[in-house]
Image: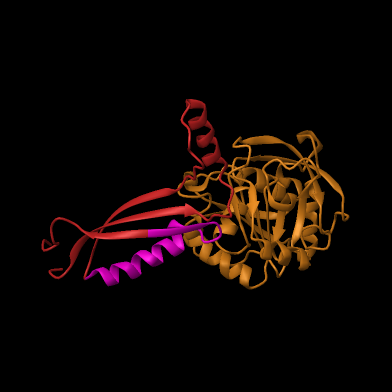
Amino acid sequence: MSVSSPRFAVIVFPGSNCDKDLLWGIKNVAGMDAEFVRHDATSLDGFDAVLIPGGFSYGDYLRCGAIARFSPVMEEVRRFAEEGKPVFGTCNGFQILCEAGLLPGVLLRNTSLRFVCETADVEVANASTRFTSEYADGQQLRLPVAHAEGRYTVTDEELADLKANGQIAFRYAKGHNPNGSVDDIAGVTNKAGNVLGMMPHPERAVEKLLGSDDGLPFFTSLINSLQ
Amino acid sequence: MESSKNYKVTVYVTYKESVLDPQGQAVQGAIERMGYEGIDSVRIGKYFEITAHAEDGKSLEETVDAICDKLLANPNMETYRYEITHAETDGAQA
């Protein structure tokens, strides 16, 4: 009897540029069944998880993620998320999930006005999500960030909700906030906990050869949650 | 359609007051360095010029409201306002 692995969809928008990194991480490193799904696809049947990559979908025209949000595949991603299945977005993927209303808040221009491209000190703020269970609370991670619009912004009421519901999954280490995000937030989940967005790139830190494999437990957490 | 009229729509999208606009602050800094005095703040927004045709201004307003709510502005940090004016000629042509 063969046990089939969970099947991952990596969404590709015009202007995505981290799609291959994500596919490499989940398929070649984590050993999962995964394939690209185009922005104009109208079905996610047969997939168990959706990964939305970084990049500059639709050239970041209007606002980051604002146009990608209306891609045909996003209707399916919304349905997928509403069914409680896991959806992960990194960087531009996070921006798209916020624009789509699948996550609260919005990502604005870094307060420094600089594009930050560095390895960030990130802290696990909640290790009890399906995306972070292989980490420990407070664990320090070294994860790459590369963005100009990463300043996570929510209202005071929304921030209180995020805290009360344990929706803050990752924070930048104290004093190392690269973009001015409120409360040093680097990644959040939706209230149900099945959608997570973050600015850092765990898929770029899955092999020691890349400088850090601190991102690998992120994917093994997600994989374990599916088995 | 014979009854449809041509309109110009101008949409202004601006940050809510509570939202920090570092780009606007950078522009303000440049103005100060140029030596101009009395400029208290600068906020950068977006401006859209749209041409449209509709049966009447009322139905066009509904459309523009929907477009602004869904696409042109993100209610998380922006607000919008718009003006609708009649274009020079009515849209009697096919």
Colouring convention used in this rendered image of the protein: by chain
In the picture, the quarter occupied by the N terminus of chain A is: bottom right
In the picture, the quarter occupied by the C terminus of chain A is: bottom right
Q: Nearer the viewer, residue A76 or B77?
A: B77
Q: Is residue A126 magenta?
A: no
Q: Which residues are magenta?
A: B56-81
Relative side of B80 to A186, left or right: left
Dividing the picture into quadrants, the one containing residue A225 is bottom right
As drawn, A115 above or below A133: above
x then y, percent, for residue B64:
35, 64
Residue at 76% across, 65% down: A226
Residue B36 visible within the image: yes
Q: Which chain is orange?
A: A
Q: Nearer the viewer, residue B35 or A192?
A: B35
Residue at 71% across, 58% down: A188
Relative side of A209 to B36, left or right: right
x then y, percent, for residue A91:
63, 48
Q: Is residue B75 magenta?
A: yes
Name the outermost residue toward the front.
B38
Residue A44 visible within the image: no
**Main secondary structure of the magenta stretch:** helix
Relative side of A187 to B87, left or right: right
As drawn, A135 above or below A206: below
| Chain B colour in the picture | red
Q: Nearer the viewer, residue B40 or A81?
A: B40
x then y, percent, for residue A94:
62, 53
x then y, percent, for residue B86:
20, 60
